[in-house]
């Protein structure tokens, strides 16, 4: 069984052939796909994909790149999206201090709020952590994200910090670039 544990088929680069590519992945032996959203529009598209394909599951959340676009209404919308049958996580959420597409203060605020949503719904979290290791771990600890746990999708910290990640009920996916 092959499981694509982190896809972004909702991305606009797939607009012309999205359904064909997903079907081709399945026909090539990918049994399950987890599509992680990056903003509110992609969260809606993720739900569409989970409804169209039996083997596609989803995570809804707002990536740190889009944190500046968020408002309180988005948390309520994400909560409703997360109640869909095949939404299994909150993500991809976190902090990205490498690109800083959203102000860091806003990234931290919305990361914490999305963690609390995950806890309220008892869903695991998909964490994006790029060059923000201390702040990511501080927020995970202060918001008690270990209660739901999850996976670090993007991580470039030290081995010592990785031990802290694991100690806080999070798994780690290695992605070589």
Image: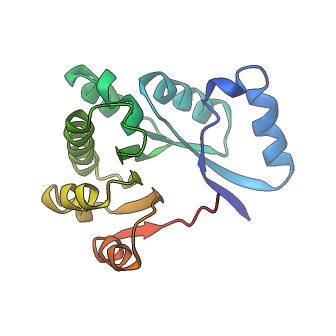
Q: Is residue 105 visible?
A: yes
The image's colouring method is: rainbow
Identify the residue at image location x=47%, y=34%.
38
Quadrant holding the C terminus: bottom right
146 over 39 or under it: above or below: below
Residue furthest to the left in view is: 142
User: At which x and y percent is residue 136?
Assistant: 28, 56
User: At which x and y percent is residue 132?
Assistant: 32, 54
Q: To which quarter of the image does residue 46 belong? A: top right
Identify the residue at image location x=24%, y=51%.
119
154 over 20 or under it: above or below: below
- Nearer the observer, 49 or 115: 115
User: At which x and y percent is residue 19?
Assistant: 76, 29
Left or right, 116 with respect to 68, comes to left
User: At which x and y percent is residue 23?
Assistant: 80, 38
- Nearer the observer, 162 or 140: 162
Left or right, 16 with respect to 74, comes to right
């Amino acid at each position: 069984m092959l499981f694509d544990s982190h896809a972004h088929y909702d991305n606009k680069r797939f607009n012309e052939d999205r359904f064909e590519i997903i079907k081709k992945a399945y026909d090539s032996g990918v049994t399950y796909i987890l599509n992680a959203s990056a903003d509110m529009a992609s969260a809606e598209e993720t739900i569409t994909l989970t409804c169209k394909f039996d083997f596609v599951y989803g995570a809804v959340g707002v990536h740190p790149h889009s944190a500046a676009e968020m408002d309180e209404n988005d948390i309520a919308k994400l909560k409703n999206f997360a109640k869909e049958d095949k939404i299994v996580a909150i993500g991809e959420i976190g902090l990205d201090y490498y690109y800083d597409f959203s102000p860091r203060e806003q990234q931290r605020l919305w990361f914490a709020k999305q963690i609390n949503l995950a806890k309220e719904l008892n869903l695991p979290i998909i964490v994006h952590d790029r060059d923000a290791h201390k702040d990511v771990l501080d927020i995970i600890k202060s918001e008690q994200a270990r209660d739901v746990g999850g996976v670090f999708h993007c991580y470039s910290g030290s081995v010592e910090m990785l031990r802290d990640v694991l100690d806080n009920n999070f798994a780690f996916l290695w992605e070589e670039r």
